[in-house]
Image: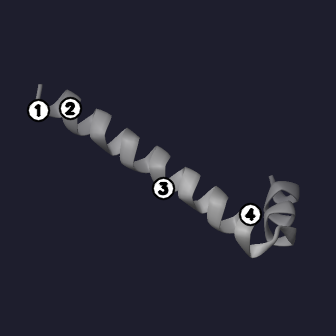
Amino acid sequence: MWKLIEDFFDQSWAMKAFIGWGWLCVLIMAAGIIDGVINY
């Protein structure tokens, strides 16, 4: 796990932004699914 974090901080800013955008999309999608299940 620590190696992954080190690798992340070795990335360029563009790569960090891309990874961050990907995680943001995943979180939004998960939130939408949870919201859909609760309100079903």
In the rendered structure, which disc, 3 or 2, sits on the residue that comes first in sequence? 3
Task: Find the residue positioned furthest to the top.
Answer: 40
Element at badge 4?
helix
Query: Where is mark 2, residue-wise?
Result: 36
Query: Where is mark 3, residue-wise?
Result: 24
Element at badge 3?
helix
In the rendered structure, which disc, 4 or 2, sits on the residue that comes first in sequence? 4
Disc 3 marks a residue whose amino acid type is Leu
Position of 1 with respect to 28 (left or right) is: right
Query: Where is mark 1, residue-wise?
Result: 39
Q: Nearer the viewer, residue 34 or 17?
A: 17
* CA separation in Å, label 2 and label 1: 5 Å
Position of 13 with respect to 10 (left or right) is: left
Disc 2 marks a residue whose amino acid type is Gly
Query: Where is mark 4, residue-wise?
Result: 15
The image's colour scheme reads: one colour
